[in-house]
């Protein structure tokens, strides 16, 4: 399972879901140290701001950040959950969860994965730049971007802990 949450609930989420892997997507000034309960080598810390284009004094997500995420996801054994968080649990973390789902489910339709993300987290509004970069790196030919665009805006404003099955069968049901 992949879990997504805001920064404020990370300690409780770690106690509740006992993840083997943790992804933190925070601006560099807010980046956290590895929390107790997670091995340092299983904590990916991506110091990026939640922006979709360059802005003065902010760290724009780049292809290298997404490549690090993809390498981390492919190194996850899936014997315990992965927890992904950002500041609010709405944009960077849901983008990372969607990217992970797409990376782990090469032949699964991107639009169905995006709808599953929104179904499980009604507040999900994935960062479009992170998704675009992943779309390019994964060779999805714009399908990831289109799937996120089709979700539209969300009326839910507060991030909260939610779970998504990491692997899906061809019939659309969770394999794990």
Image (cartoon, grey):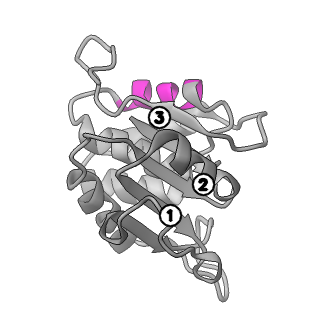
- In the rendered image, residue 69, in percent from the top left (x then y), is placed at 34, 61
The CA span between labels 2 and 3 is 28 Å
Query: Which quadrant: the N terminus?
Result: top left
User: Do labels 1 and 2 touch, CB within 8 Å?
Assistant: no
Marks 1 and 3, the one that precedes in the sequence? 1
SS under mark 1: strand
Residue at 61 percent of width and 39 percent of height: 161
Position of 72 with respect to 81 (left or right) is left
Please tell me whether residue 69 is drawn above or below residue 4 in the rendered image.
Answer: below
Tag 1 residue = 24
Q: Quadrant of the C terminus?
A: top left
Q: Position of residue 37 (x, y in %)?
A: 44, 58
Which residue: 35% across, 65% down? 39
Q: Position of residue 71 (x, y in %)?
A: 24, 61
Neighbour tally class for label 2: few under 14, some 14-19, many 20 plus, Cα within 10 Å: many
Q: CA distance from mark 1 to mark 2?
A: 10 Å
Q: Which range is magenta?
A: 110-119
> Which residue position holds label 3?
147
Residue identified by numbered label 2:
10
């Amino acid at each position: 399972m992949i879990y997504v949450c805001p920064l404020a609930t990370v300690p409780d989420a770690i106690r509740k879901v006992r993840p083997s892997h943790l992804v933190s997507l925070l601006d560099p000034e807010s980046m956290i140290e590895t929390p107790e309960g997670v091995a340092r080598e299983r904590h990916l810390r991506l110091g990026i701001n939640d922006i979709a284009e360059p802005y003065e004094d902010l760290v724009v997500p780049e292809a290298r950040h997404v490549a690090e995420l993809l390498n981390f996801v492919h190194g996850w054994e899936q014997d315990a959950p992965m927890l992904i968080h950002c500041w609010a649990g709405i944009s960077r973390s849901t983008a990372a969860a969607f990217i992970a789902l797409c990376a782990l489910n090469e032949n699964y339709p991107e639009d169905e994965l995006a709808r599953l993300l929104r179904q499980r987290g009604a507040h999900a509004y994935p960062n479009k730049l992170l998704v675009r970069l992943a779309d390019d790196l994964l060779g999805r030919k714009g399908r990831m971007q289109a799937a996120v665009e089709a979700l539209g805006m969300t009326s839910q404003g507060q991030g909260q802990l939610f779970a998504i099955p990491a692997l899906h069968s061809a019939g659309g049901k969770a394999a794990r």
